[in-house]
Image (cartoon, rainbow, N blue to C red):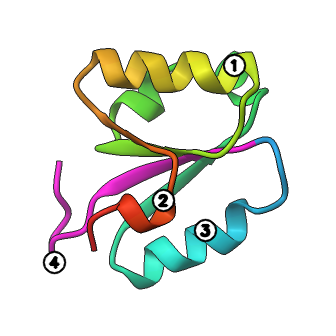
Amino acid sequence: MELRGGGMRIAILTSSNVASKYAATLIMRGHEVIVGDENVRAISGLEPFLECDGCLLLGKETELLDIAEAMQRAGKCVWRDLAKIPK
């Protein structure tokens, strides 16, 4: 699901206020970003996340870990470090 220009669609899974900082960096690298917190699955389900190429997991809450696990089972990348995401 690579975007034009080589970017990917990446979900940022976090329970803290750092999502905007990471999102800005990823957008500057040419990626498309969606942000999810520990409450988002109840609102939107897994579908928006499974449409992504991978996720940046920045939290340890059960909901975030469940989303990341579902993405991994679907063959998506799960990163815990911004530096590991391909540019």
Q: Main secondary structure of the magenta part?
A: loop
How crowded is the residue under tag 4: few (<14 C-alpha within 10 Å), some, or many (20+)? few
Q: Is residue 69 left or right of residue 58?
A: left
Q: Earlier in the sequence, mark 4 or mark 2?
A: 4
Determine which of the numbered discs, if any, sits on residue 11 in the image.
none
The residue labelled by disc 3 is 22
The earlier-in-sequence mark between 3 and 1 is: 3
Q: Residues within 10 Å of mark 2 (few under 14, many from 20)?
A: many
User: In terms of depth relative to the viewer, which is nearer, 43 or 60?
Assistant: 60
Residue at the spot of label 1: 63
Q: Residue at x 35, y 42 (%)?
A: 54
State the CA–CA distance, disc 2 to disc 1. Answer: 19 Å
Rendered residue at 38%/25% (across/down):
71
- Helix, strand or loop at label 1? It is helix
Q: Which residues are magenta?
A: 1-14
Which numbered mark, 2 or 1, is in the foreground of this view? 1
N-terminal of the two: label 2 or label 1? 2
The stretch drawn in magenta includes residue 70:
no
Q: Which residue lies under the disc numbered 4? A: 5
Q: Where does the C terminus fall, quadrant-wise?
A: bottom left
Give the residue number, with chain letter if any, for mark 2. 33
Tell me where residue 10 appears, x and y as whole percent. Answer: 41, 52
> Which sits earlier in the primary sequence, circle 4 or circle 1?
4
Could you tell me the amino acid type at mark 2? Answer: Val
Identity, as a three-letter code, of the amino acid under mark 1: Glu
For label 4, the SS is loop
**Mark 2 touches mark 1? (CB < 8 Å):** no
Q: Look at the numbered discs 4 and 3 and tell me whether their residues touch, using CB distance below 8 Å.
A: no
CA gap, disc 4 and disc 1: 32 Å
Crowd around label 1: few <14 · some 14–19 · many ≥20 (10 Å): some
